[in-house]
C-alpha cells in the first residue's frame, strides 16, 4: 500500500494534455504496489492506471519494464500496456518523477488461492515465458546470488533479533547455493515476483498479470520456483502438493520443462525462499517507524526454506 | 489515507449478491478518508464506493450519516447516495464491519483552492444548509464546547511539547469561548468538516461534496467558520480576505445570513480553530509510531486561532 506523491489537479491536467485520452474525470490514489505511487485515473474516454516511479525503482530500468509490458501485451498476454502520448513516448515526467499511464486490467487478486487458481497461474507463467523469448532487451537479476550476498552482509549481524540462529542459517544457505547454483538452464524473461497480489482473476478465470518491476533475465524455471513458494503453501505453513502438481502440469502443457530444470527445482526453490527471506529480513530490520508499509514477516520464508532443504527431488513437489 | 480492512474476493462477491448491481469487475483500496476503509468498486453495471466503517465511527451514528446523504441527494445536492440492497436496507456487514455501497462522484479535490473554488463552495454550503432543514434526525456536535473540554484535559499537560505556551493558550481560549459562545443562532444540519479534500470539482466547477462523517446538528454559521479556516488561509499562513468575501457573499446569495450570525463569525472562527487545533494536537501526541496516517501539524491552527483572536468584527473577513 503506497501513495507517496500527491498529484495536484493542475499538474495532472497538464500531464494528461500530452495524451489523446480525453479529460480527467477522477483520480484516486490506490493502495497497490509498494515501490510506486499508483492512481486510478478516469478520463472522459476510459479508465487507466497512472504510475509515478518513486526512488526505489531505478530510472535506467524503466525502458526494460515498459518495453516488456508493451511487448507481452502486443503478443496477447493480458497485462498493463503503457499508453503512448502524442510524442510517441510512454515515459514522461509528473511532479518531478518519471510517470506513465498504463491500461486498466479488470479482475481481483485471490486472497485465498485455490487449486484452480494455481493451475491457471502455471499456464499463464509458461505463456509469459514463451512470449518473452523474442524480447530483445535484457536486465540482470539484481536479486540473485550477488544480490543475496549483499543482503546477507547487510542483515546477518542483526538477523538473530528476528529469530535466534537465523544469522547462521542465511550465511550457510548462501554458501550452499553459491556452490550448487545451476548454470545451464534456459534463460529468458521472468516476472520474478508473481505473488497472488500480482495475478488477477475475474469469475474464477485468470484475467491478467501485473507489476513487472522485478522482471529480469534469469532461469525460466526460477520463476516457477518463485510461484511454488508464493502459491503452494497453506496459511498453516504446510506445503500443498496438489496445488504444486497442478501448477507445474499446467505450466508443462504450455512449455515442456526439460528434466534438467525439473531436477533443479528443489535448489531453485531454496534460492527463491532465501531471496524473499533476505528482502523481508532487510525491510524488517530497516523500515522507518512511521513508514506507510507494514513489513512482512521474514520467518514465513525461513519455514519455506527449511521445507525445501528437506526436499530430496522434484518428487517432493509432486512432479516426475 | 487508509485501508484498514482487507476484503477477500469471496466475501465481496457474497456481499454484492445482496444488491442489484451486477458482478464485481474490480475493487481497489483507495487512499481517501482516514476513519474508514474505502474501495473503488467496479461492477458490470457501474462504479461505486464501498465503505467499511472502522472503530472510530460509532455504529449508532450511521443511520444519521446515511440518512442525511440520502436526504440531501434526493433533494438534488451532489453527494454520495447510499445504495439500497434488495432487502431495502443500505447498511450491511462485510468482514465483521458495518459496510455500505454509495454512488461514485466524479471530480477531484482542489490541491490549491482558488477564489473561484471558494465562491462556489460558499454557495454549495448554503445549499446544503437549506436542503438539510427538513431532515428529521439530529446528532449533537461531539466536537463543540463539551468535546473541546475533554480534549483540553487530554492534551494540556503535554501541549508544550509541540509549542512552548500552547497548554495555557488552549486552556485560556476554552475559558473564553465557554463565557462567550453564542446561544441564539439558527441551528440545523452542518457538514462540520468541509475541507478542500471533501469538495470535488470537475473542469473548475464544483461537482460534489463528500465525507459526511462529522455531520451534526449545530449553528449553521459555525459551518461557514469551519470553511473560512479551511479554505481562506494561504500556504504562507496569511488570511486571504478576497477569498473570504467571495465565499460569504456566495453563501449569502443562497441563504441570507442574519446580522446576528455575521456578528458572531469571529467567535465561531475561534471555536472552529480551537476544534481543529485540539484534534490535531491530540492525534499528534497520541498517534502510534507505525500508524498509516501521518498526523497533521497542530500549529497551523494555532496561527489561525491567533488571527481570529485579533479580529474585532466580521469586517476582518471582508464582510459587512
Image (tube, coloured by chain):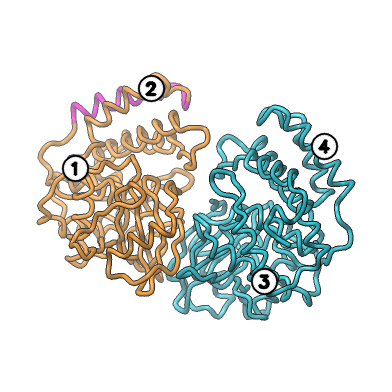
Chain colours: A orange, B cyan
Q: Are marks 2 and 4 on the same chain?
A: no
Nearer to us of marks 2 and 1 is 2
Q: Nearer the viewer, mark 4 or mark 3?
A: 4
Whether labels 3 and 1 belong to a single chain: the reply is: no
Q: Regarding mark 3 in the picture, which secondary structure is present there? A: helix
Task: Identify the subunit bearing mark 3.
Answer: B
Q: Earlier in the sequence, mark 4 or mark 3?
A: 3
Chain containing the residue with disc 4: B
Which circle marks residue B128 in the picture? none
Asked whether, in this view, residue B302 is left or right of residue A120, the answer is right
Q: Marks 4/1: CA distance? A: 77 Å
Question: Which residue corresponds to mark 2?
Answer: A167
Residue position for label 4: B172
Q: Secondary structure at mark 1?
A: helix
Residue A12: image location, x then y, percent:
38, 59
Q: State the extent of the magenta-drawn residues as a range.
A: A162-180
User: To which residue does mark 1 refer?
Assistant: A263
Q: Quadrant of the C terminus of chain B?
A: bottom right
Query: Which circle, 2 or 3, is nearer the viewer?
Result: 3
- Disc 2 versus disc 4: distance between alpha carbons? 57 Å
- Residue position for label 3: B69
Amino acid at each position: 500500500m503506497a501513495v507517496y506523491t500527491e498529484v495536484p489537479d493542475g499538474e495532472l491536467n497538464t500531464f494528461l494534455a500530452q495524451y489523446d485520452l480525453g479529460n480527467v474525470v477522477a483520480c484516486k490514489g490506490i493502495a497497490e504496489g509498494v515501490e510506486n505511487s499508483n492512481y486510478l485515473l478516469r478520463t472522459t474516454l476510459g479508465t487507466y492506471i497512472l504510475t509515478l516511479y518513486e526512488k526505489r525503482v531505478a530510472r535506467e530500468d524503466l525502458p526494460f519494464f515498459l518495453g516488456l509490458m508493451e511487448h507481452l501485451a502486443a503478443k496477447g498476454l493480458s497485462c498493463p500496456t503503457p499508453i503512448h502520448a502524442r510524442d510517441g513516448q510512454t515515459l514522461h515526467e509528473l511532479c518531478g518523477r518519471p510517470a506513465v499511464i498504463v491500461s486498466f486490467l479488470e479482475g481481483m487478486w485471490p486472497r485465498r488461492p485455490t487449486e484452480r487458481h494455481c493451475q491457471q497461474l502455471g499456464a499463464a507463467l509458461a505463456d509469459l515465458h514463451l512470449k518473452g523469448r523474442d524480447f530483445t532487451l535484457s536486465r540482470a537479476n539484481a536479486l540473485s546470488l550477488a544480490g543475496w550476498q549483499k543482503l546477507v552482509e547487510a542483515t546477518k549481524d542483526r538477523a538473530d533479533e528476528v529469530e535466534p540462529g537465523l544469522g547462521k542459517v542465511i550465511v550457510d544457505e548462501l554458501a550452499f547455493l553459491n556452490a550448487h547454483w545451476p548454470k545451464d538452464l534456459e534463460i529468458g524473461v521472468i516476472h520474478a515476483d508473481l505473488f497472488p497480489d500480482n495475478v488477477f482473476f475475474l469469475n474464477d478465470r485468470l484475467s491478467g498479470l501485473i507489476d513487472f518491476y522485478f522482471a529480469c533475465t534469469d532461469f525460466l524455471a526460477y520463476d516457477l520456483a518463485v510461484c511454488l513458494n508464493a502459491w503452494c503453501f497453506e496459511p498453516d505453513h504446510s506445503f500443498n502438493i496438489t496445488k504444486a502438481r497442478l501448477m507445474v502440469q499446467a505450466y508443462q502443457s504450455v512449455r515442456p520443462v526439460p528434466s534438467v530444470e525439473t531436477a533443479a527445482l528443489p535448489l531453485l526453490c531454496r534460492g527463491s525462499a532465501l531471496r524473499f527471506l533476505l528482502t523481508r529480513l532487510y525491510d524488517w530490520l530497516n523500515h522507518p517507524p512511521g513508514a506507510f508499509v507494514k513489513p512482512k514477516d521474514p520467518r514465513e520464508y525461513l519455514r519455506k526454506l527449511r521445507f525445501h532443504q528437506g526436499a530430496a527431488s522434484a518428487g517432493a513437489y509432486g512432479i516426475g
